[in-house]
């Protein structure tokens, strides 16, 4: 979780939804800001509230009263491909990866065992959160800036990797798996359950 007392906002970093880009752009306005330095594995942790809170949920660590709660969401089909590219095993199909992710066996750490949760789980219970869109990253960042009174800048796109078209990954069975696993996200964020 990112927090700015001066600008009274909390940003909940849902994995694989553009949170790294938001972290980089918001860094100067956070409590105890630090210089960005080179982009490597530990760089984001320095900007989060305290160790272990990088991907904390609202239910576990709520925002101070009166603070704006914000988070980015992403098309679940796109997010699944991002997780698969990051954590899928060599030779593993997407159809085989999805149930492993859902069962919390995609990786070893306790944090990584939560990646199969719907995005909605990270902000469940938050009062009127500002939902930003991965598919409109710059426009979303501009909206957040306007709401909290910080300068609008060009948001970097960190951890971006090129990928193949959706049909390369998805069989009809895999599409149904994702639609069922992350049904709350499709319902809450309005994404169609057909492939883009």
Image: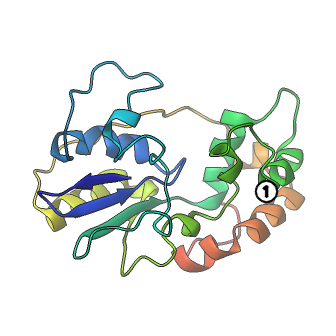
Count of labels in the image: 1
Task: Report the coloring of the rendering.
Answer: rainbow
> In this rendering, would 83 be left or right of 65?
right
Task: Describe residue 77's horizontal placement relative to residue 91 as left or right.
Answer: left
Q: Position of residue 73 (x, y in %)?
A: 49, 61
Q: Residue at x 21, y 46 (%)?
A: 30
Picture residue at 14% right of the left edge, 59% below the top: 7
In this figure, which residue is indicated by the disc labeled 1?
102
Residue at image x 89%, y 46%? Answer: 96
Assess disc 1: are there few (<14), some (14-19) or many (≥20) residues with their C-alpha within 10 Å of its C-alpha: some
In the displayed structure, would residue 183 be above or below residue 26? below
- Residue nearest the viewer, comparing 115 with 169: 115
Residue at image location 34% in from the left, 34% down from the top: 46
Q: Position of residue 162 (x, y in %)?
A: 57, 32
In which quadrant of the rendered view does residue 172 lie? bottom right
Where's residue 91, x and y in %? 88, 29
Q: Return the residue nearer the eye: 157 or 129.
A: 129
- The C terminus sits in image quarter: bottom right
Please state which of residues 183 and 31 is positioned toward the viewer in this rendering: 31
Helix, strand, or loop for circle 1?
helix
User: Which quarter of the picture shows residue 6?
Assistant: bottom left
Q: Position of residue 157 (x, y in %)?
A: 38, 37
């Amino acid at each position: 979780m990112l927090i700015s007392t001066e600008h009274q906002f909390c940003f909940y970093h849902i994995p694989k939804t553009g949170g790294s880009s938001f972290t980089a752009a918001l860094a100067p306005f956070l409590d105890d800001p630090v210089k960005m330095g080179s982009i490597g594995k530990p760089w984001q942790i320095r900007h989060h509230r305290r160790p272990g809170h990088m991907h904390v949920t609202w239910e576990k660590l709520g925002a101070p009263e009166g603070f704006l709660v914000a988070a980015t969401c992403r098309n679940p089909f796109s997010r699944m491909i991002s997780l698969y590219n990051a954590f899928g095993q060599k030779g593993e199909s997407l159809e085989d990866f999805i149930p492993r992710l859902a069962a919390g066996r995609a990786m070893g750490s306790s944090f990584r065992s939560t990646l199969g949760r719907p995005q909605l789980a990270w902000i469940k219970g938050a009062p009127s959160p500002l939902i930003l869109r991965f598919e409109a990253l710059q426009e979303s960042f501009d909206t957040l800036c306007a709401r909290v009174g910080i300068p609008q800048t060009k948001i970097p796109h960190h951890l971006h990797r090129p990928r193949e078209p959706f049909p390369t990954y998805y069989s009809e069975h895999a599409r149904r798996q994702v639609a069922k696993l992350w049904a709350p996200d499709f319902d809450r964020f309005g994404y169609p359950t057909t492939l883009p």
